Image (cartoon, helix red, strand yellow):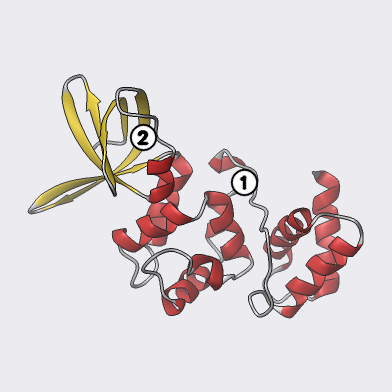
Amino acid sequence: MIGKLKGTIDEIDEDSVVIDVHGVGYVAHCGARTLAGLPAPGEAAALFVETYVREDMIRLYGFATRAEREWFGLLQSVQGVGAKVALAVVGTLSVAELADAVALQDKAMVARAPGVGPKVAARIVAELKDRAPAYSGPASGESFGLKREIGEGVAAAPVADAVSALVNLGYSRDQAAGAVATALREGGEGAPSTTLIRLGLKALSRA
């Protein structure tokens, strides 16, 4: 099984890239974010790879980081989510944004990915809420994501109230949302706003 490719960019297409590794060109299917971050043809590059073997084909999926590859696999554990949808999600949202969307149960954020409807997005955030934290934070090589906005009707009232309270205390909206996302992991989905504020302040004090 191929887990990583390191070579020279040969060509970049709309949904894939060809990497020349010692004279052999490997086609790796990638999301939009990964493709946008690749260097120009002729330059060196490396991709983390997930190898799919079927009776009639072998397909490689490429990712800029190990964490993206892990999310790709994790997303496919959700009912009705295959490789195409999972690649669209990781190709649209960063690891940090995905972690926030799941922690804050923000299906609208996930639904930004092409081909992902409201029902599938809702299923993703619901089914991954107890498993996704393992893929955020230090293990991913990125700090826990900071959500940029919490729109009306997107987050539950206690979450929105807690974020608003922290903003009123002088923290930026990104800091407040990130702290409340961490608080949700500790306090649980049904925690009241007072608990989320207390845990959020604790998280901010450790930052």
Residue 126 location, x and y as percent? 52, 73
- Amino acid type, mark 1: Gly
Q: Is residue 192 above or below residue 163?
A: below
Q: Is residue 148 above or below residue 108?
A: above
Depth order, front residue of 45/122: 45
Q: Nearer the N terminus, badge 1 or badge 2?
A: 2
Residue at the image position 62 percent from the left and 46 percent from the top: 137
Identify the secondary structure beneath mark 2. Answer: strand
Image quadrant holding the C terminus, namely top right
Residue 143 location, x and y as percent? 65, 44
Horizontal side, residue 46 vs residue 135: left or right: left
Give the CA separation, mark 1 to mark 2: 21 Å
Horizontal side, residue 82 vs residue 148: left or right: left
Residue at the image position 90 percent from the left and 64 percent from the top: 168
What residue sits right under mark 1 in the picture? 137
Residue 187 location, x and y as percent? 74, 66
Q: Residues within 10 Å of mark 2 (few under 14, many from 20)?
A: many
Q: Residues within 10 Å of mark 1 (few under 14, many from 20)?
A: some
Residue at the image position 80 percent from the left and 52 percent from the top: 203
Do labels 1 and 2 touch, CB within 8 Å?
no
- Amino acid type, mark 2: Leu
In the displayed image of the protein, which residue is found farthest to the right? 169
What residue sits right under mark 2 in the picture? 47
